[in-house]
Amino acid sequence: MTLLLSTQKLSKNFDGLQAVSDVNFDLPKGQIRALIGPNGAGKTTFVSMLCGRIRQSSGKVSFEGKDISDLAAHVRINLGMAYTFQITSVFASLSVWENVALAARRASLTSNVEKVVMDSLEKVGIAGKTAQAAGDLSYGHQRLLEIAMGIAQSPLLLILDEPTQGLTDLEIANFIELVRSLSASTTILLIEHNMSVVMQVAELITVFDFGKILAEGTPDQIRANAEVQAAYLGTSNA
Amino acid sequence: MSDLRKSLCLHVGLLAILFVLQFILPAYHHGNLARIMVLAAYAVGYNILFGYTGLLSLGHALFFATGMYGMGLLINQFGAQPASALIGGLFAGALISFFLGLIALRTEGVAFMIVTLMFAQAGYLLILYFGAYTRGDEGFVIQQAERMLWNINLSNPTIRYFAALFVFSISMLATLRLVHTPFGRVLIAIRENEERAQMLGYDVFRHKLAAVVLSGTIAAMSGAAYGLLFGYVGASFASVQYSIFPLLWVLLGGAGTVLGPFVGTLFMFYLIDLSSGITSAYMLIAGITLVLLTLFAPQGLVGELRRRVFRWLP
């Protein structure tokens, strides 16, 4: 089992607030991993340090065995990461097609951009909306566009930050299918609040609480973990 | 007809009309249009940075004047030929914009505006300081005898008109091409959402720097051509006013449109020209018109047309 990504004692301090502290995290190639935890547990801060959006206060990030802690975000993306934003961040006044094309052009030197764009849009199910301005899409469809922009880069690691927020049940079912089909070629790191999605797709779950890893295990192990229940439900497990 | 076809027809059509106008226009308007075309090239350069990349510079007079003085001093001080002087001016513009970009792009928004403004002021003051060579405020004339490009007399109105058309054409066609290249699309993406562009793996700083250099070099080309064609190099072209002009032209014509800079320059030139024929308070008329336009066509003339009718305008 080769590691795609790992962190050593990764920490982030926001003016005295310890958002993430000393996290050691290993992600093997080809896995679908879910990150869960209560609001404010540090999940988004953590993945933002992985892809370079936020610089760590201390600690190390390695990707494919290489220390990438000091690399700028765009360099990390070029190494094979793709990141979809928690708060939808698309090019609102550009067309859906152009949004995905921007992602595809950077990643592929081939002249295949047209095909990659259409494939990505078809996979997420919004291929019929290519000419629309991205800002005119419904919120859920903007989420799907974000995912399309992620997979158009054919990344080694796809980081999805709350991808199913605002999707309909049907779209969620489609999303689960999509993640499973992607896992053959891509490692997926998923922040998700929808437990039924997590339990269905994740091979391994990492639970964050107060900036630390509280537990890690298969869906069944996590479901049975008393500490996790306490963190979520607020009951005492003393 | 595909959108690409339509836009090509429109832009080449404009150049054809400008070509034909050479033979029709009375002398006065003929001279005006030659000036407008050279200045429109300046606006086109400005538009690449402001309209397409989303960076508002208040210091483009520095680039315009660098081209103009680079060319002028080479002729005046070193007796260079116009062709090499032009290339010298262009090269100086590219160099200055590269270094200014390296410094100014460390800032954003208002700070970027102030940094570019201050550097342009420094350039203006340098021209005054080295008055022994630049003749300061007064400037210097490039004699008719020095304006012979390969035995072609650039002070001849017809030649001058065609030279101006040439300068404008290359800058406009370059932008038209630019917005269809992957590089140009990334600039637009940076304008729309810089963080997203970076998180798609694009080196935002390098793209912006390239935009500054491209924009500055076109401005320098326009400045060099202006000095050579109209025979005068002066410090007023380095003043704040000449940094504000391209911003106004582009805003009026339509930022982020290929035709906008020309339309804006033409409109403003004749607005001042015509209103000064009516009253000595012509700036009042110009001012009110500008306010009305900003109120009712905030995207500029061409920008409004694109929004309402011609969605395909690049």
Image (tube, helix red, strand yellow):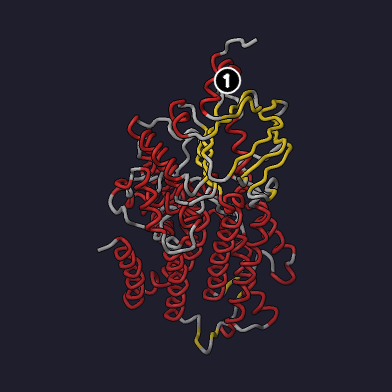
Where is residue A125 drawn, in percent x and y? 33, 43
Q: Quadrant of the C terminus of chain A?
A: top right
* SS of the residue under disc 1: loop
Q: Nearer the viewer, residue B126 or A153?
A: A153
State whether residue A46 appears in this view: yes
Position above or below: A143 against B209 = above
User: Between B77 and A30, which is closer to the camera in this rendering?
Assistant: A30
Which residue appears at 43% of the width and 26% of the height? A196
Disc 1 target residue: A225
- On screen, A14 above or below A5? above
Q: Of residues B58 and A123, which is closer to you in this image?
A: A123
Q: Position of residue A146 (x, y in %)?
A: 44, 42
Tell me: B50 left or right of B117. left
Residue at the limit of the structure toward the bottom, as seen here: B151
Q: Residues within 10 Å of mark 1 (few under 14, many from 20)?
A: some
Percent x, y for residue A31? 53, 41
**Left-right relation of B130 to B7:** right
Q: Residue at x 62, y 26 (%)?
A: A215
- Residue B287 percent across, percent down from the top left: 45, 47
Q: Is residue B248 visible?
A: no
Q: Is residue B108 left or right of residue A110?
A: right
